[in-house]
Amino acid sequence: MLPGLTGCVPIAETPLVVTVRGVSYPSDLTDGQWALLEPVFNVPGKRGRKRADDLRTVVDAMLYIAQTGCQWRYLPESFGPWTRVCSQFRRWSRNGTWARALTVLHAAARQAVTSGGDAVDARHRHAPRPRRVQWRSDLP
């Protein structure tokens, strides 16, 4: 203990945590989900086609932000530079790419429901109806 300091607890040194590429998060897309959305995000632009593996990382980063609510600057390094993710999000928001992705997801969800593949929606379909309130006419 240092002389003159009483009641102080020394703080242990914590090792530096280094994130590596390839870390998975619960918000990451599965291979099946990416196969559904890749054609939406990987369209040829003015500068040619983008790298699909990089785009998947960017989409995973955007989903991480949406699920955790963290700020762009605090995005884990395993997703790459936060400026790249932020600028791509703004670009896709402005040019309608996110709207097209939601349309694809909506169509896939409707197809799963009509084919009977989604148990959650089937459960809601057969849920009991709410009771109707009977109004008494004899109350003042």
Image: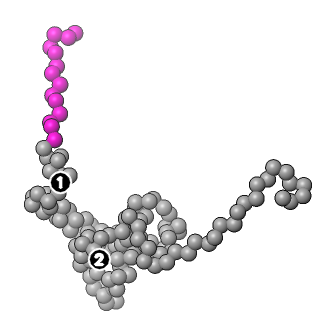
Highlighted range, magenta: 127-140
In the rendering, at what x and y percent does residue 42 appear?
Answer: 28, 81
Which of the 4 quarters of the picture holds residue 117? bottom left
Q: Quadrant of residue 56?
A: bottom left
Q: How many marks?
A: 2
Q: For the residue labelled by badge 2, is the local secondary structure a helix, a strand or a loop?
A: helix
In the picture shown, does residue 113 fall above or below 140? below
Q: Which mark is residue 41?
A: 2
Q: Residue at x 34, y 89 (%)?
A: 47
User: Considering depth in this image, is 140 or 110 the residue closer to the camera?
Assistant: 110
Tell me the residue at 31%/73% (across/down). 95
- Main structural element of the magenta stretch: helix, strand or loop? loop
Q: Which residue is mark 1?
A: 119
Q: Nearer the viewer, residue 112 or 8?
A: 8
Q: Which x, y percent locates residue 121?
A: 18, 52
Q: Is residue 64 left or right of residue 124?
A: right
Name the residue rendered at 39%, 76% in the picture.
57
Amino acid type indicated by mark 1: Ala
Q: Residue at x 37, y 65 (%)?
A: 27
For this orientation, the residue located farthest to the right is: 4
Is 73 or 10 nearer to us in this picture? 10
Q: What numbered label is drawn on residue 130?
A: none
Q: Position of residue 46 (x, y in %)?
A: 32, 87
Indicate yes or no whether the magenta region holds residue 107: no
* Mark 1, other Cα within 10 Å: few <14 / some 14–19 / many ≥20: few
**Does residue 97 appear in this view?**
yes
Q: Position of residue 106 (x, y in %)?
A: 20, 62
Name the amino acid type tagged 2: Phe
**CA distance separating discs 2 and 1:** 29 Å
Quarter occupied by the C terminus: top left
Where disc 1 sits, the SS reads: helix
